[in-house]
Image: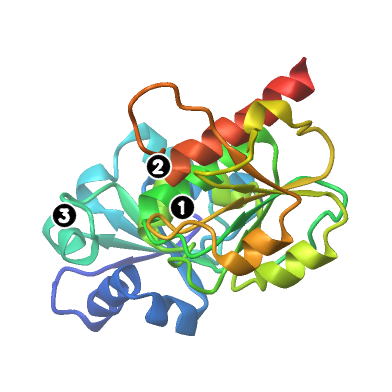
Amino acid sequence: MHYIAKTITSPHNDEVKALARLVQHSRDRRKEGVMVLEGIHLAESCLQAGGALPRLYLNEAAADKPEVRALLARLPADSVVVTLPEAVMAKATALASAGELLALSPRPRPRAPDASAARVLLEDIQDPGNLGTILRCAAAAGVWDVFLSKGCVDVFSPKVLRAGMGAHFALRIHEHADLEAELRGFAGRKLVTHLEGSSSLYGHDLCGAVAFVFGNEGAGVGDALLALADARIRIPMPGHAESLNVAMAATVCLFERVRQLEG
């Protein structure tokens, strides 16, 4: 064993209570400068991307799983691994049942965007599942810069991290961005999705530098961003649905770009 090992057995322990607060409240995570990674996959993704796991909480019931042991073997010597009984682990997690582990990792610092590349701008996305899915889609489509308005749900919340499935560690994520300023300063094409868009997504050249703007689940893209768009695009829907979920719309747009690049 090359890491620092601890054991906590009481659900009333102050550290367990603090961990539960980190899982539940973005204010506490921001104050501590951390994100909470639930499960082996996210912890592995963090390590593969060169991230740190200074503190890890291990479900005692999962300690002998080969994949858990392999992950622990990769931890640096100054990492602290706290083993918890499954019942105590369940007190901290937001999941219906306790997973193998919870890990704390420093909240990533913003990296400079690629000014000549495609990017995604998100205005006031509220649903964690939607946001995580959009991030996962952007990473899969090779669009590395994602800008989020101040009104978006916490991008590093456990729910968004789970939905992103490791995408956070591949992307350059820009929180609390001034989306109007970003669009004004962007030299490429600016495309905003709109139910009453004047042109079809499939009629646009999506190769090269293009900014895709997606809006709030209920309100859509605001007037200020609409005014800065080069085009308001619609996704043709010959069926009976009134609209697409924002994550689905983002997927269609980003993978139409992939199709054009591959074609």
Q: In this rendering, would 17 be left or right of 75?
A: left
Name the residue nearer the viewer: 243 or 157.
243
- Which of label 3 and label 1 is nearer to you? 1
In screen coordinates, is 239 left or right of 71? Answer: left
Relative to 16, is 116 on the left or the right? right
The residue labelled by disc 3 is 86
Q: Position of residue 249 (x, y in %)?
A: 50, 38
Mark pair 3, 1: CA separation:
30 Å
- Residue shown at 20% from the left, 60% from the top: 89
Residue visible at 46% across and 52% down in the picture: 131
Query: Going from the N terminus, do you reach mark 3 or mark 1 first?
Result: 3
Q: Nearer the viewer, residue 221 or 104?
A: 221
Q: Which quarter of the figure has residue 115?
A: bottom right
Of callouts 2 and 1, the N-terminal one: 1
Mark 1 is on which residue type?
Leu
Pinpoint residue 117: horizontal percent, then vertical percent. 82, 46
Residue 109 visible in the shown view: no
Viewer-proximal residue among 57 and 221: 221
Q: Residue at x 16, y 49 (%)?
A: 97
Residue 150 image point, x, y percent: 54, 74
- Residue 25 location in percent, x, y? 33, 75
Q: Image height check: is 68 above or below 190? A: above
User: Which residue corresponds to the image point at 64% horizontal and 63% vertical from the top-left?
Assistant: 225
